[in-house]
Image (cartoon, helix red, strand yellow):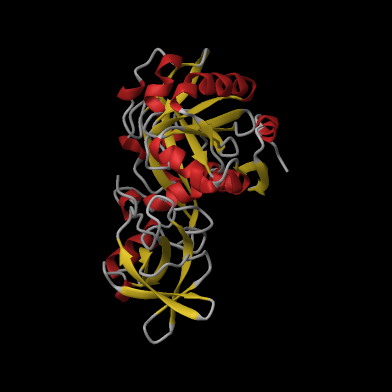
Amino acid sequence: MKNTALTEVHIALGAKMVPFAGFNMPVQYEGVNAEHETVRNGVGVFDVSHMGEFLIEGPKALELIQKVATNDASTLTIGRAQYSCMPNENGGIVDDLIIYRMKEEQYLLVVNASNIDKDWEWISKYNSSIGATMRNISDEYSLLAIQGPKAIEAMQTLSSVDLSAIKYYHFEVADFAGIDNVIISATGYTGSGGFEIYCKNSEVEQVWNKVFEAGASYGIKPIGLAARDTLRLEMGFCLYGNDIDDTTSPLEAGLGWITKFNKDFVNSEALKQQKEAGVTRKLIGFEMLERAIPRHGYDIVDAQGNVIGIVTSGTMSPSMGIGVGLGYVPTAFTAEGSEIYIQIRKNAVPAKVVKPPFYKK
């Protein structure tokens, strides 16, 4: 099990630590609901240093990214980021990722912690015939997500750049918390605003301490991965391994908006045909109509009790007080308002199909 540069800090703060994607990570501090509310209404900080970072550089960098990722990275200008995914050769997804254009011929790829080795091998396989320069810097960098409606105001004293001017999916390389050349990006996974800080492992404890000093009067708190999951689920954001994986196509997962057929990428022909023919199942959002908690892996059934799908993510929404979830069902059941049932032990509990986000400010 790997530790992040802040593991000892989390233990000292009383975090409950769990193994996650090969890392020893803080799952919660004072409790999921309290931490969730902190981010929705104030400001909280996640250590997400387990995420992977690859630098793709040189004159062939864009060519490689265009080949392995579905979105059109040629539209990226320096200072912008893009959500994308890497399709496999069988119609599924290797991983979802964020692509940052750092310089004219330099891109930063941020990938999921559980997929670092798999992604590196996958991209390397295609790079063997392209020849971009690749560097895996995952073990050298830390990542903090400072999230919540008070994040910008609480952190502004730590940087000379106007944090409020960094638009969604844009970033700056600037000074932060007394450290130069920090990436400050606005690609949040919580739906409550804020930004992410990428810095070197040797710098992150200084950044963490200054963040908590600056945020003290705003009620800043450390937040664990459990609240990160409830926050992202309320927004309907996909989690790799749950809602998307090697068997789910980007089109089934509702990721057609990041799948651009104006270029040739891995398995693009087959996905194009799937788009033209129409998918047979889709990822939907649903809300429970009775008090019940849908869980990952529960069956989704129709009115007659036939199994039609599976819950990929589910929880009791801390912000709304109702059960919400995501799951794959045949397209006949995907219209908004459609009634489905979640099999919870012996009971088929009614739910209705809704379009995420579940939580609306």
Relative vertical location of residue 106 with respect to residue 284 in this rendering, above or below: above
Relative vertical location of residue 177 with respect to residue 258 in this rendering, above or below: above
Whole-percent x, y for residue 265 in the image? 40, 50
- Nearer to me, 268 or 234: 234
- Can residue 60 be seen? no
- Nearer to me, 88 or 137: 137
Relative vertical location of residue 29 with respect to residue 167 in this rendering, above or below: below
Relative vertical location of residue 340 with respect to residue 53 in this rendering, above or below: below
Q: Is residue 234 left or right of residue 198?
A: left
Q: Hey, which residue is sitting farthest bottom in the picture?
A: 304
In which quadrant of the rendered image does the N terminus lie?
A: top right
In which quadrant of the rendered image does the C terminus lie?
A: top left
Q: Hey, which residue is sitting farthest right in the picture?
A: 1
Whole-percent x, y for residue 230 in the image? 47, 50
Q: Residue at x 49, y 27 (%)?
A: 197
- Nearer to me, 294 or 129: 294
Q: In this view, does 12 lie to the left or right of 255?
A: right
Q: Residue at x 36, y 33 (%)?
A: 149
All told, the count of numbered labels is 0
Q: Which picture quadrant has residue 99?
A: top left
Whole-percent x, y for residue 355 in the image? 30, 59
- Nearer to me, 82 or 35: 35
Whole-percent x, y for residue 254 in the image? 35, 58
- Can residue 264 be seen? yes
Q: Residue at x 33, y 52 (%)?
A: 357
